[in-house]
Image (spheres, helix red, strand yellow):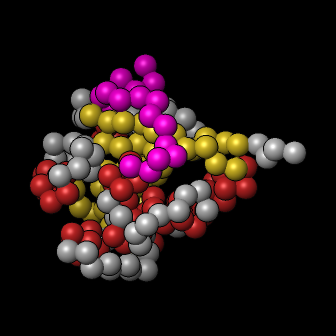
Amino acid sequence: MRQKTRTIYLLFTRSETYPSRAIHFFTHGEYTHVSIGLEGPTGVFYSFARKYPQYPLPGGLVQEQTERGFYSIHPDVPCCLRTLAVSEDTYRFLRRRLGSMYLERDCYHYNLMGAISSRFNLPLARQRHKFCSEFVAELLRESGAVRLEKAPALTKPMDIYGLGSLNTIYRGSVGSLGA
């Protein structure tokens, strides 16, 4: 008997903000931010990012939506939406983990020092501190969705983007996603 598969969504973006420009300068990646969602293109995505759309800091665990917050202010941000087929068990694990983390979102912070140290190939994993790709990589690894070559604290958005098991379903501006 085949186990039912579910779909998870990975949203890759690159804005023109100073933090995104700095990440691009060091990584040269097409995308500088990644978030994970379970509800489809217009649903909620989770990531570690700015808590307030106008300010880069403070950062932490946030819910992102294309029609609200940062993306509603910057609808022209280029993006790529990729999907990953996972087992029902993996999907349920991710749903529970994201839900429990989001309930405690005030305890989580952006891992700025970890993001900087990863540039020098020095992993700096800190309790309850993550940067976007570290967070997504950790979830994908813990859930068993994919095998990753690098430690989550060294994973860049483009490392996740390059996983062969992902399928691209949209490329364009974030404001047109789901339109």
Q: Residue at x 17, y 52 (%)?
A: 28
Q: Residue at x 40, y 69 (%)?
A: 150
Residue farthest along the right direction in this orientation: 1
Q: Position of residue 120 (x, y in %)?
A: 20, 74
Seen in the image, is 117 located left or right of residue 89? left
As displayed, is residue 175 above or below residue 60?
above
Is residue 171 highlighted in magenta? yes
User: Which of the pair 41/144 is nearer the observer?
Assistant: 144
Seen in the image, is 1 located left or right of residue 23? right
Q: Position of residue 70 (x, y in %)?
A: 30, 42
As displayed, is residue 114 above or below residue 44?
below
Q: Residue at x 36, y 36 (%)?
A: 80
* Observer able to see residue 62: no
* Observer able to see residue 162: yes
Which portion, as a residue range, is magenta?
A: 162-179
Question: Quadrant location of residue 58?
Answer: bottom left
User: Which of the pair 161/89 is nearer the observer?
Assistant: 161
